[in-house]
């Protein structure tokens, strides 16, 4: 479980990344560039200590304090986690084309968005690779195969 202390962003709070995202990520995700986008995003997120949100290596902290006498009060760690996760969702959206945004509508966490985008666009990428291999095998010079 992640503590509130572990969620502190050392050098760059997520909120300061959002305005600078356009200079950090040079492509917006669409049907043609998932591998490039994914590579850039992984470097960016890892470089700022945020990859654990999207790859699910940081577990969501306990929402309520079981030792507390007051019921229904969220823990600080849970509140901070949600704030950071929502900001990260906003950061991810800033790197998506309008088509890609339509695939993450309804996602409730940055991890959900990451998985949804991977499922959608890695399939497109695999299909494109297969298509290109097929086209390459069928290349001809005149009537002769190359």
Image (cartoon, rainbow, N blue to C red):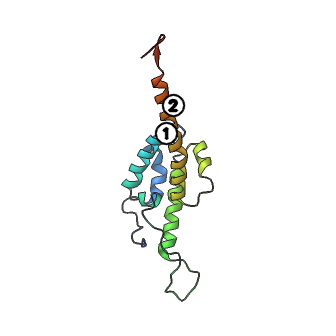
Residue 27, position as x, y percentages in the image: 48, 40
Camera sees residue 121: yes
Q: Give the number of the disc on residue 1.
A: none
Closer-to-camera residue (92/59): 59
Quarter of the N terminus within the rendering: bottom left
Closer-to-camera residue (113/20): 113
Camera sees residue 24: no
Closer-to-camera residue (77/102): 102
Q: Is label 1 in a helix, a strand or a loop?
A: helix
Residue 118, position as x, y percentages in the image: 51, 49
Relative to 69, say whether 104 is above or below: above
Quarter of the C terminus within the rendering: top left
Residue at point 46%, 43% (across, down): 37
Q: Residue furthest bottom?
A: 69
Residue 53, position as x, y percentages in the image: 46, 60
Label 2 – label 1 distance at C-alpha: 9 Å
Q: Is label 2 in a helix, a strand or a loop?
A: helix
Among numbered discs 2 and 1, the one appearing first in the sequence = 1
Residue 86, position as x, y percentages in the image: 54, 61
Residue at point 48%, 29% (across, down): 132
For mark 2, what is the residue? 131
Relative to 127, say whether 18 is above or below: below
Crowd around label 2: few <14 · some 14–19 · many ≥20 (10 Å): few
Specify whether 60 is left or right of 47: right
Q: Give the number of the disc on residue 126.
A: 1
Residue at point 54%, 77% (across, down): 74
């Amino acid at each position: 479980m992640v503590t509130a202390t572990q969620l502190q962003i050392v050098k760059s709070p997520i909120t300061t990344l959002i305005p600078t995202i356009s200079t950090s990520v040079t492509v917006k995700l669409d049907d043609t560039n998932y591998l490039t986008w994914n590579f850039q995003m992984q470097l960016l997120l890892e470089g700022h200590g945020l990859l654990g949100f999207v790859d699910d290596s940081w577990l969501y902290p306990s929402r309520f304090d079981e030792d507390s006498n007051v019921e229904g009060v969220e823990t600080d760690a849970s509140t901070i986690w949600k704030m950071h996760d929502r900001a990260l969702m906003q950061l991810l959206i800033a790197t998506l084309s309008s088509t890609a945004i339509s695939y993450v509508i309804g996602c409730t966490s940055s991890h959900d968005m990451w998985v949804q985008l991977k499922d959608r666009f890695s399939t497109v990428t695999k299909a494109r690779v297969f298509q290109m291999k097929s086209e390459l095998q069928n290349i001809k010079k005149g009537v002769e195969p190359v």
